[in-house]
Amino acid sequence: MSKHVVAALQLGSDPRGKQATLEKILSYEDQIKESGSELVVLPEGLLGSYPKGEIFGTYLGYRLDEGREKFCQYFKNAITDNGPESEELAGLSARTGASLVVGCIEQTQHALFCAAFFYDPEKGLVGKHRKLMPTASERLIWGQGDGSYMPVVETKVGRAGAVICWENYMPLFRAYMYSQDLEIYCAPTVAVTDIWQASMRHIAHEGRCFVVSAVQYLPPPEVLGVDVPHWDPKEELMRGGSVIIDPQGNVLAGPLYHEEGLLTAEIDTDDIVRARYDLDVSGHYARPDVFKLVVDTRRKLNVEKVTEDCCCQDK
């Protein structure tokens, strides 16, 4: 069967914290079921939040104590891959029968990562991608993922992978993802500019794959009851812009602006084959005799324990 329904769930992080955000996600269970969606993509940093406008008390050369306290609170609002929030998401996937790609802030012992968790209806959490290159001041609060966290996951719809926000402007990362025979290119983000829409259409057309981009929507600060420095309290923090695009760059659904909602589209994965008839950047349109990309997918650790193997000792 080549026809499927995919979706982008456009939501914003609840300022009350991860539990309130999780409840908002779970409230869409019936809509996901009714839509027949087999794969649902959620925005960047949804669980754990994208702290737009926050400076965490940092100035060049010094950090303020109040900024350290804000970071401590932000750290506690992040989720883990084996915590209760992850279990709830696995349950949502199982009950709806939909694979989920969830943008979140992942808490580890030593760092926070902007991540995308992949959930399978039968197997639960089956993979995660950690953002390789946090953008600008994001580097103050998030670590960098390495090449071991760039999965492509088998779903009912096809092979799915995630590229988060401005990672999509890393041409070599895109080239690697295309080479993995990616069919559903998931792009969780908080980017709300018009150029983002052009980029998503270009990527779908370049990679000859379906693109599902899920964007956060957040109303004005005065509606949320929060204060964002240097921001008009009456202006939307994030206007959304979730969109679904076919392998030739045609918009199938969206962009959705100025509201939360489940954006869906029926796709035909045979369209990927049709589109690659005249352009396949990892296949017949490649020139490996001229260009070559080397990708290191090994896990990187700054401390490795090496012990002597007793079997190698003389007896």
Image (tube, rainbow, N blue to C red):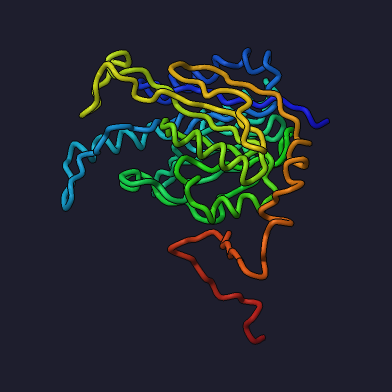
Q: Is residue 2 left or right of residue 44?
A: right
Residue 33: x and y in percent read 67, 16
Instruction: Work out whether 215 lies above or below 226.
Output: below
Is residue 174 or residue 54 the one in the foreground? Answer: 174
Look at the image and tell me whether residue 102 can be seen.
yes
Residue 184: x and y in percent read 66, 38
- The furthest residue to the front: 278
- The furthest residue to the bottom: 314
Is residue 195 or residue 25 the one in the foreground? Answer: 195
Q: Is residue 303 left or right of residue 187?
A: left
How many numbered marks does the figure carry? 0
Which quadrant of the structure image shows residue 182?
A: top right
Look at the image and tell me whether residue 190 can be seen.
no
Quarter of the image for the N terminus: give it: top right
- Could you tell me which residue is drawn at 70 percent across and 24 percent down? 266
Which quadrant of the structure image shows residue 51?
A: top left
- Could you tell me which residue is drawn at 51 percent across and 21 percent down? 256
Is residue 190 or residue 311 the one in the foreground? Answer: 190
Residue 283: x and y in percent read 72, 56
Which quadrant of the structure image shows residue 138?
A: top left
Q: Is residue 178 left or right of residue 77?
A: right
Residue 168: x and y in percent read 50, 45
Quarter of the image for the C terminus: give it: bottom right
- Could you tell me which residue is drawn at 30 percent across and 19 percent down? 235
